[in-house]
Image: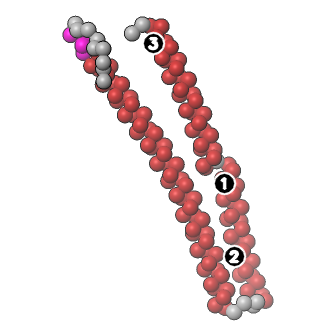
Amino acid sequence: MDPADFGKSVDQEIDDFNRERARIRELIGRIGGVRYSRIDSLVNLGFIVLVVGLFFLEITLHPFPTTVSIEIGVFLVSMKIVWMIHANQRYNHFVFWVLNSIEFRLNANARSLDELSKTVALLRDGGEKPLDTQ
């Protein structure tokens, strides 16, 4: 391999790495960034206001029968649990994506290392580099 070609491939690898890093930063911002935490905070605040407000409304004015108030409370808590499960699934999907990307990169590096090891072994034995390394 010509040293000039090596420099070009390293520069290309660095550019590819920087593009991928920028793409990952954008995805992290969309999936679990500040915007999502604001939405999550608003939903949490909404649930708290509803549950506490209905609790004090029921204690002071008794606008609903007791069983209806309990059913409303159970419904609101159930909806909060569904919201938490949804947020957890988004996080797990992101973690899976990151781990899958790491595995893909490790496999590519392992293949490159195997090819380099074969080429070094051939050169050490005095042979020529094979035309097709695949």
Give the alpha-carbon distance from disc 1 to disc 3, as whole Å.
44 Å
- Disc 1 to disc 3: CB gap under 8 Å: no
Q: Amino acid at mark 2?
A: Val
Q: Quadrant of residue 60?
A: bottom right
Q: Which residues are magenta?
A: 121-125
Q: Is 123 covered by the magenta stretch?
A: yes
Q: Amino acid at mark 1?
A: Ser
Magenta portion: prevailing SS class = helix
Q: Nearer the viewer, mark 1 or mark 3?
A: 3
- Of the residues under marks 3 and 2, which one precedes in the sequence? 3
Label 2: which secondary element: helix
Q: Amino acid at mark 3?
A: Phe
- Disc 3 to disc 2: CB gap under 8 Å: no
Where does residue 66 sit, x and y in percent of width and height?
67, 91
For the residue pair 50 and 101, the one nearer the viewer reads as: 101
Label 2, on which residue? 51
**Mark drawn on residue 89:** none
Where does residue 61 sit, x and y in percent of width and height?
78, 89
Quarter of the figure that contains the C terminus? top left
Label 1, on which residue? 37
Total count of labels: 3
Q: Nearer the viewer, mark 3 or mark 2?
A: 3
Whether residue 98 sits left or right of residue 125 in the image: it is right
One can see residue 110 in this view? yes
